[in-house]
Amino acid sequence: MTDMQPNPNPQRVLIVAPHPDDAEFMAGGTMARWARTGAYIHFLLITDGTGGSREPEQTPAQLAAIRREEQLNAARVLGAQDVTFLGYPDGRVEPTLELRFAIARVIRQVRPDVVICGDPLFRYSPTYINHPDHRAVADATLAAIMPTANTRLSALELLEEGLEPHDVSEVYLSHPVTPTIFVPVTEDDIRRQCQALMAHASQMADWKPEEMIREWSRKTAEKAREHGIECDFAEAFAYVRLHNPAQQSKPEANSEAA
């Protein structure tokens, strides 16, 4: 576990998620916790989510509209103020320069002190193969944070759009291969996380995620307590500190409303 202590109450948070409902699995409890303390939270959804159906009668256009609305509702439950949709085709994402610039553009617009994204090192577990979109988005996000979003001459196109460079202070990698920090969350945070997941009705169907989420959070809390963090529920991350976290005044929401 890292000796660096993250800012427990970040002011501006951007979570970069490959598909609708990924953000809630990645850090739903943590986002609920930070929203309670007054953080501005912005969701960036990379794909349209059109790969998430096995129904023969479903069309991509219909599903994209459904999943967009579900994501807006889920973001509200967690206390997020804004959502940006990039609309990349589900299942076809690659860590291209175009994607890197698209994510860096949002970083320069939102100007977060914290970015949450996936861990690009996570490829599989004994019972799961990580989706290629997840790996691609994680790779592209880290490259967007540095150097594309924060280096002036690396993205002249963004400067021409009037977007000045921005330094992200902290990065939280979800589903980490090697966890380095644990964020304690409360019963209410878990409840909100589960409510947000249930807002994705097209994906949840009859499945109730609460039992699984609670079990994950309890097991993570066991590891957190081994590191001296007393809690009943927790989420784990690999943590990167690029700059010392700084308290900032809460901004006005300035993008597409969730």
Image (cartoon, helix red, strand yellow):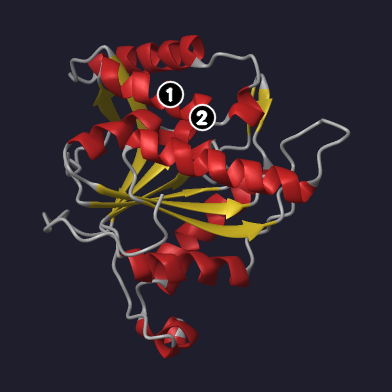
| Residue 124, above or below 165 | above
Residue at point 45%, 82% (across, down): 158
Residue 192, located in which quarter of the rendered image?
A: top left
Hey, what amino acid is under mark 1? Gln
* The furthest residue to the right: 56
Q: Residue at label 2?
A: 199
What distance separates the C-alpha of mark 2 from that of mark 1? 6 Å
- Residue 218 spot, x, y in % from top left: 36, 11
On screen, residue 241 versus residue 74, left or right, reads left
Query: In this rendering, does residue 191 appear at all?
Result: yes
Residue 196, located in which quarter of the rendered image?
A: top left
Label 2 secondary element: loop
Hey, what amino acid is under mark 2? Ala
Residue at point 81%, 38% (across, down): 58
- Residue 53 spot, x, y in % from top left: 76, 34
Q: Residue at label 1?
A: 195
Callout count: 2
Mark 1 surroundings within 10 Å by alpha-carbon count, few (fewer than 14), some (14 through 19), many (20 or more):
many
Residue 168, located in which quarter of the rendered image?
A: bottom left
Quadrant showing the N terminus: top left
In the depicted view, which residue is nearer to us: 157 or 39? 39
- Quick check: marks 2 and 1 in contact, CB under 8 Å? yes
What's the mark number on residue 43? Answer: none
On screen, residue 83 versus residue 165, left or right, reads right
